Image (tube, rainbow, N blue to C red):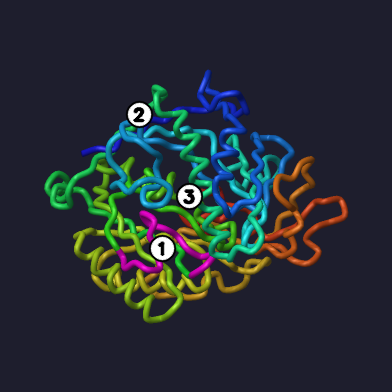
C-alpha cells in the first residue's frame, strides 16, 4: 500500500462566482461558503476576509489554521471521525492546495490565542505569513457554553477547509509524492542494515482549550496507540487547543508535520522509519505514569534503535516529555527531544520545568519569552483588543501608535516544537 500526495501550487486567492482553481488561483464563492458555515446554530455571524503575504494586515486572535485537502477517489472531505465520515486515513490518493489556508478568528473562548502578521518582523517568525489566507471571522450566539463555543469554531474551520479542498478534486497535481506503507515485520525484513527509528508524537490534552483529537476522539481519553505516519496527512489529528500561540500545533502543523515528512524523505536511504506512537499530555501524575509506561512499551515493541519525541506546550507537559525520555532510554533506545524554552526575557531562567540526565540530546525551537515589537498594521482582521491579556502580552503591550510589544509566545508558530519555525538555540 502507498499514499500518494498530489500537490497543487496556488499563487493567488480571490473571491469569485464559483469555487474553483484556475491558472494557479483559488477562487472562492463567498456567499456559498458563508451559508454553509452559518448552518451551525451556534454561530451568530460569519465574515470572510482574504490576507495575502506582504500586506499590512494583522490577524488576531487566531484559533486554528487548516490546509485544504481532498481525497479524490472517495466522497466527502478529510478529517475522518471529526468533520467527515470515518475512514482509515493515510493511504490512497490525496490532493493538496499548497500555498493557501483557512484561518479562524473572531470572538474566542479564551485568550491564549495569538497573532499572524502578514508583513514586518512578526511575519518572519510565522510560517502562515507566507500563505494566502482565507480568514473566517465568527461570532457565537449568546448563551452557549464554552465547550459548545470551542467546538463550533473548531468544526467551522474544518468544514471551510473541506469546502475549499473540493476545488482540488479534479485538478491534475503539479507534483506527486508517494509514501510507502508496510506492516511492521516488512520494515525489518526489507531494511535489515538501516537503523530503525520511531516517532513519539505527544499531543496536548489537558482539558477545555487544551485538547487535541485523533479520529474525532479527545486524546485525553486515549491510551498511547500506534499510527502510520501518513495518517496525519489526511487529517487523523486535529487541533482543538489554545495553548500559548508560539508552540501550539495548529491543524496545519499536523497536516504538514516536518518530523514526519523529514523522516519519510530519508526512509529507505539512511534510516528505516517504522511508525509513530501517539500519546497524550494529561494533568495528573497517574495519567502521566500510565501514558509514559505504555509509550515506552510500544516503542520497545517496535524494535527500534532510536526515537524522536516532540511535545506541545510547556510547563506541565515538560514532565511528560522527561518521563517518556527516561523510560525509553531505560530500555536502551536512544532519544532526541524537540521542545522550546521559557527562559525568561533575559534568557537566564530555567528553560524547562523538568529535566533528566538522560535527556542529553535536545533540539530547541527558541526562547518563547524573548520580546519583540510589532509595528502597527493598516488593517486588523479580528480584534487587537485582547493583546494585553493573551499569553505573551502584558499591561502596556499596546502603544499609542498601535504598535505592540509582546513575547514571542504571542506569535502563532514562532517557537513551534515540531521544528516548523526558523528559531533554535546553540551553545557558545
Give the structural element (helix, strand or loop) at label 1.
Answer: strand
Along the line of sight, the residue nearer the viewer: 323 or 252: 252
Which residue corresponds to mark 3? 251
Q: Position of residue 21 (x, y in %)?
A: 51, 24
Q: Position of residue 278 (x, y in %)?
A: 34, 60
Check residue 133 in the rendering and tell me which mark sits there, or answer none: none
Q: Is residue 127 visible?
A: no
Q: Is residue 12 visible?
A: yes
Which residue corresponds to mark 1? 218
Q: Position of residue 37 (x, y in %)?
A: 56, 43
Give the structural element (helix, strand or loop) at label 3.
Answer: helix
Query: Is 99 placed left or right of 185 in the picture?
Result: right
Mark 3, residues whose alpha carbon is within 10 Å: few (<14), some, or many (≥20)? many
Marks 2 and 1 sit apart, C-alpha to C-alpha, by 32 Å
Mark 1, residues whose alpha carbon is within 10 Å: few (<14), some, or many (≥20)? some
Closer to the observer: label 1 or label 3? Answer: 1
Q: Which residues are magenta?
A: 207-224
Query: Disc 2 or 1, which lies upstream in sequence?
Result: 2
Along the line of sight, the residue nearer the viewer: 309 or 38: 38
Which residue corresponds to mark 2? 176
Q: Position of residue 43 (x, y in %)?
A: 61, 51
Amino acid at each position: 500500500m502507498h499514499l500518494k500526495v498530489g500537490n497543487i501550487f496556488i499563487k493567488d486567492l480571490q473571491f469569485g462566482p464559483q469555487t474553483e482553481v484556475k491558472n494557479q488561483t483559488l477562487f472562492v464563492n463567498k456567499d456559498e461558503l458563508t451559508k454553509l458555515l452559518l448552518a451551525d446554530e451556534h454561530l451568530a455571524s460569519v465574515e470572510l476576509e482574504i490576507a495575502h503575504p506582504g500586506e499590512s494586515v494583522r490577524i488576531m486572535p487566531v484559533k486554528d489554521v487548516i490546509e485544504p485537502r481532498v481525497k479524490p477517489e472517495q466522497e466527502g472531505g478529510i478529517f475522518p471521525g471529526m468533520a467527515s465520515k470515518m475512514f482509515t486515513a493515510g493511504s490512497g490518493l490525496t490532493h493538496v492546495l499548497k500555498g493557501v489556508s483557512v484561518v479562524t478568528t473572531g470572538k474566542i473562548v479564551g485568550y491564549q490565542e495569538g497573532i499572524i502578521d502578514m508583513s514586518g518582523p512578526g511575519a518572519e517568525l510565522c510560517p502562515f505569513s507566507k500563505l494566502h489566507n482565507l480568514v473566517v471571522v465568527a461570532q457565537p450566539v449568546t448563551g452557549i457554553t464554552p465547550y459548545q463555543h470551542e467546538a463550533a469554531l473548531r468544526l467551522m474551520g474544518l468544514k471551510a477547509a473541506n469546502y475549499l479542498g473540493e476545488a482540488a478534486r479534479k485538478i491534475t497535481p503539479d507534483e506527486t509524492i508517494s509514501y510507502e506503507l508496510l506492516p511492521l515485520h516488512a520494515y525489518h525484513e526489507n531494511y535489515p542494515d538501516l537503523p530503525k527509528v520511531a516517532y513519539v508524537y505527544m499531543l496536548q490534552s489537558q482539558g477545555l482549550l487544551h485538547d487535541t483529537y485523533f479520529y474525532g476522539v479527545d486524546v485525553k481519553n486515549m491510551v498511547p496507540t500506534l499510527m502510520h505516519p501518513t495518517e496525519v496527512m489526511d487529517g487523523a489529528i486535529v487541533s482543538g487547543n489554545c495553548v500559548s500561540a508560539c508552540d501550539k500545533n495548529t491543524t496545519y502543523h499536523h497536516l504538514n508535520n516536518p518530523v514526519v515528512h523529514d523522516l519519510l524523505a530519508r526512509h529507505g536511504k539512511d534510516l528505516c522509519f517504522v511508525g509513530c506512537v501517539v500519546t497524550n499530555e494529561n494533568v495528573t501524575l497517574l495519567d502521566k505514569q500510565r501514558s509514559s509506561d505504555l509509550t515506552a512499551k510500544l516503542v520497545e515493541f517496535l524494535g527500534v534503535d532510536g526515537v524522536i519525541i516532540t511535545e506541545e506546550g510547556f510547563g506541565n507537559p515538560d514532565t511528560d516529555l522527561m518521563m517518556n525520555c527516561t523510560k525509553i532510554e531505560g530500555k536502551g533506545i536512544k532519544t532526541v527531544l524537540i521542545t522550546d524554552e521559557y527562559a525568561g526575557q533575559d534568557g537566564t531562567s530555567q528553560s524547562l520545568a523538568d529535566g533528566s540526565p538522560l535527556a542529553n540530546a535536545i533540539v530547541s525551537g527558541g526562547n518563547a519569552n524573548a520580546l519583540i515589537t510589532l509595528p502597527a498594521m493598516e488593517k486588523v482582521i479580528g480584534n487587537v483588543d485582547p493583546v494585553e491579556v493573551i499569553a505573551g502580552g502584558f499591561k502596556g503591550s499596546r502603544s499609542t501608535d498601535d504598535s505592540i510589544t509582546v513575547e514571542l509566545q504571542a506569535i502563532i508558530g514562532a517557537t513551534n516544537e515540531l521544528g516548523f519555525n526558523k528559531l533554535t538555540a546553540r551553545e557558545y
